[in-house]
Amino acid sequence: MTNRENFLSLLRRTGYEWVPVEFVLSPHLQKVCREELGAEDYEEYFQFPWRRVEDLRLKDHDVEQYRKYYEKPLASGADIDVWGVGHEKSPNSMHMTYMRHPLEDMETLEELQEYPYPDYAHADGSHQAEQVRRIKERDLIALGDMQMTIWECAWYMRSMEEMLCDMMEENEMAEFLLDKVTELSLLRAKAYARAGVDVLFLGDDIGMQHTTMMSEELYCQWLQPRLKKIIDEVKAINPDILIFYHSCGFIEPMIPHLIEAGVDVLNPIQSECMDFKEICRKYGDKISFHGTIGTQTVMPKGTPQEVKAEVWKNLDAAGKQGGLFVAPTHMIEPEVPLENLLAYVEACRTYSGAKK
């Protein structure tokens, strides 16, 4: 099998010949890999099966316009993203920020309607098809990555407390904001599909460590139909596209709803929150999985042999037909030893249970 054939067959549960590897490194571990392995580009060095296609490029979108929405000014050095969300940096984290919410204090629908959302309707996507072509020419999978699809975009702007209150009160502000975010995400998703990506990665965190972030009723009323709308329209353009969906935490009650929405691959099946073998037994004939190797537990705290054992155990649970793109469940933080990262890679490359 070629790389593309192996990857697609693995995720479609029709057998595979080898186990691909994939992870995200913190800046610290990127530096370690450069210095100790000579890996200037770790995706190339470790031969990842996919490469990302750039999102739509916004035209004349000045994020400085959003500063006026913060009555209390943002901290010095804070970044503002394309949605106007302020990110104040933490000295204790490599990638987490303290978020400030530009819509938090708005009290009327009119205020939400007047907010300058990113203009994806007039964004530039001319680069995408060419990037897809070049990626596929290298026998790689073309990946469109737009995690933070609906729920997270909305609450990052509105704040989680206000957004949940709006939803529970069935406030028209919730309907407008979720519809607006869905409309803009749909423009991005359809552009990726028309460009020919093999995989579209959607996602919104809807789980916490031991429970879901909201009730099934609330999720099915407000979020699942909007996710399904995006996936339906994307698959109308390309029925063969694989839809990945990310949510950290415990989300087992939501899995049937994600399957019904059209999700093909669920990420990351956080091992500290759900048992992969049980999840695979219940749902593995309907959906595939990506992740399962805990970044709170075995990756930072285990031995290299324990990392390998976890990889092999989960691949065995998925079976020879495939259905698991095994990988760490989140960014590899500085406390993870390089030896454990290399053990994960070696475990994937030496696994002998694939269907040849």
Image (tube, grey):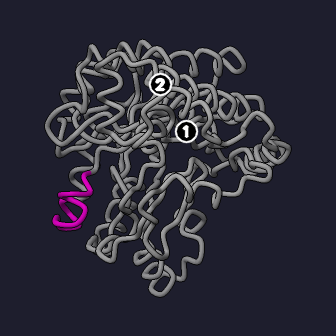
Q: Nearer the viewer, residue 80 or 202?
A: 80
Q: Position of residue 146 (x, y in %)?
A: 56, 41
Of labels 2 and 1, the one closer to you: 2
Q: Position of residue 65 (x, y in %)?
A: 64, 56
Q: Nearer the viewer, residue 322 or 104?
A: 104
The circle on residue 264 is: 2
Q: Residue at x 39, y 53 (%)?
A: 348
First in sequence: mark 2 vs mark 1: 1
Side of 131 relative to 302 (left or right): right
The circle on residue 106 is: none
Query: Please, what is the three-letter code of the amino acid marked with disc 1?
Result: Phe
Q: Residue at x 70, y 21 (%)?
A: 238
Quadrant of the image occupied by residue 32? bottom left
The circle on residue 7 is: 1
Q: Position of residue 180 (x, y in %)?
A: 58, 27
Which quadrant of the figure contains the N terminus? top right
Residue range (magenta): 294-306
- Residue 160 inside the magenta-drawn segment: no
Label 2 secondary element = loop
Q: Position of residue 61 (x, y in %)?
A: 73, 52
